[in-house]
Image: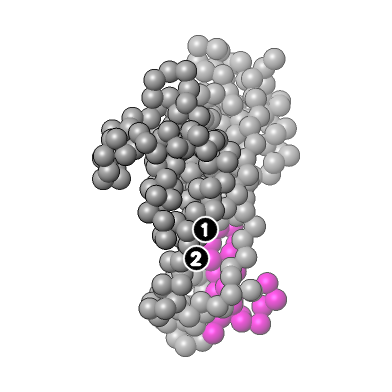
Amino acid sequence: MNLLRDKGELTKFQILFELNKRQPHVKQEEISSSLGITVQAVSKHFKKLIEEGLIEAGAEKANYRLTPKALEKLEEGAKSLERYALKIENGLKIERVWPAIATRPISAGDRVGLIMRQGVLYAVESSNPDAKAFGVVTTDAAAGEDLGFEYLEGKVEIERGRILIVKLPGIKEGGSRAVDLVKVRALYEEFKPDRIGVMGSVGRAVLNKLGLKADIEFGINRAAAVAALRGLNVFVLVVGRMANRMIDEIDQTNIKRTIDITYEIKDGRRL
């Protein structure tokens, strides 16, 4: 736990995290205010971080980006803090109650297996071969009803979902009329998504032309990342510049949860 032993290391970790949220246009005053340290202290840390190859200064003023080395450091630090928090939780014997859906009639006190299907946690027979995690039910529940469970053992196995981002031309570039519908249809059928997301009028028009309906239309950056986190594959149609916002959200989720949601970007424009 080097982060907690060395105050300087912890401050560097915090600054890197703030940078990741704000890059590329970063104001040291905002980081100073967020962390409760002086601007002078932030400036000194910036110089050290540049020397260590963790951040790069752009040509423009207040233009900074994290290097791959910095992203690795953030991920390692997040994992260390997560492990330490778990030790504290176990040491304090904090009891939690988690929700799930019953697949059969279950009584309070029953030991059940827990599996994830289509992003939803289900309570099944403890003898179910797919169950790698188990808990004790706190409430009676009928099949299809919600229940609470505690004393979680093992780990719920989740195969992370993927996100396919299809970039579309903006309205000035022709909008949906400049989209290669045959290509987009082929991408959709090959990807076989669990959910479809759309951002903007151009994407909605494309879905209309393809005879498809969106499952996610609002708050799509966050929603797509969470869906993939729960094992769902998400097919997203966005106008070019909006794709960057989605990528930032996925990267933030990967760092925050210390996981690796994979995504791919395809061009849906007609060549």
Residue 219 seen: no
Residue occupying the point 56% across, 19% down: 169
- Image coordinates of residue 264 in percent, x first then y, are 65, 36
Horizontal placement of 239 versus 61: left or right? right
Near-viewer residue (109 or 70): 70
Residue linked to disc 2 = 83
Residue linked to disc 1 = 79
Q: Is residue 128 magenta?
A: yes
The range drawn in magenta is: 111-130
* Residues marked 1 and 2 touching at CB (< 8 Å): yes
Spatial CA distance of label 1 from label 2 is 6 Å
State the SS at label 1: helix
Q: Looking at the rendering, which quadrant does residue 32 occupy?
A: top left
Horizontal placement of 112 versus 18: left or right? right
- Image coordinates of residue 225 in percent, x first then y, are 52, 46
Q: Is residue 219 magenta?
A: no
Look at the picture and state if 26 lies above or below 131: above
